[in-house]
Amino acid sequence: MPFVPVTYSDGAPVLSSTGSQRVACAHLAEWLVTLDALNVARGRGHVTFFQTMGGADASAGTHTCGSAWDMKYISDAAVMDAREMGAAVWPRLAKYGWTTGDHVHGLIACGDNGCNAYQYAAYWLGYNGLGLSGVAAGDPLPKPSARRTWREGIAWAQAQMNTTTTTEDDMPRLRLDTQGTGWFLTDRGAVTIDTTDDAKILRRVLDAKDYLVAEDRVLPGEIAVYQKYLARANGTTVTTTAGAAIDYAALAKAVNDDAAKRMEN
Ligand SMILES: [Zn+2]
Ligand SMILES: [Zn+2]
């Protein structure tokens, strides 16, 4: 199969140090776009590629069939992401005895594996892919949580990116504590709570797990109070003034209604 250009997730071409376009089999090129996107989504920045298709790799021709790539080592977590995406991939680091430059070497089992199928097999047997049959030494890292094809790996990565773009991180679980003279929010540093009523509301919001879906449990005004202190804890300002109007009568009614509902149940 013909090799195709490798691009980053933003569409920019992946070039070699001499400026030539890096190429790979069409499957790896598609997979690497997703790997790059996942790394960006994780806050690691773009992948730094050292090689895709080519003959210069120290591991004896494993890049000549188009399904292998080398990249800069960032962290074990980044390698594990590539493993979760279905690749056979190892950190090649001095601490594991690698002497010719730290990097990460990986390949996907896409059918273009005439030059490196033995490494994929060795990977799943728990070896490091080096030496005869790739079984020179043990694998320094654990297996992924599931064995996925490269296509399933792309789907897994896309699910990860969807998860990381939800608002979960915007709504951390703050903790309300009394420290000596007053109420404080912790987990984001100590933030003083202005009034006892605010502290009661915060207690209620913080205790209401999944309060955003349980809209009948927490009033909009209460969420606004929570958001005010969340912003304070984060050092930002609230852009709306919705928090100003707390309807304490409605709050009392909601509490009573809630108690009545529980009686019925
Ligand atoms: Zn391929
Ligand atoms: Zn390599």
Image (cartoon, rainbow, N blue to C red):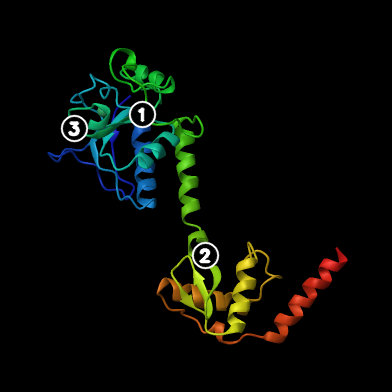
* Residue 101: mark in rendering: 3
Give, as a three-letter code, the residue at label 3. Answer: Gly
At x 41%, y 40%, the residue is 81
* Residue corresponding to mark 2: 171
* Separation (CA) of disc 1 from disc 2: 36 Å
- On the image, the x and y values in percent for residue 111 come to 40, 22
* Separation (CA) of disc 3 from disc 2: 42 Å
Q: Nearer the viewer, residue 12 or 185?
A: 185
- Residue 82 shows up from this direction: yes
Of the residues under marks 1 and 2, which one precedes in the sequence? 1
Q: Nearer the viewer, residue 93 or 61?
A: 93
- On the image, the x and y values in percent for residue 28 come to 35, 33
At label 3, counting other C-alpha atoms closer than 10 Å, the crowd grade (few under 14, some 14-19, many 20 or more) is few
Give, as a three-letter code, the residue at label 1. Answer: Pro
Q: Is residue 128 above or below residue 7?
A: above
Give, as a three-letter code, the residue at label 2. Answer: Met
At label 2, counting other C-alpha atoms closer than 10 Å, the crowd grade (few under 14, some 14-19, many 20 or more) is few
At x 50%, y 34%, the residue is 145
Q: Residue furthest top?
A: 132
* Residue corresponding to mark 1: 140
At x 60%, y 83%, the residue is 196
Of the residues under marks 1 and 3, which one precedes in the sequence? 3
Q: Residue furthest right?
A: 264
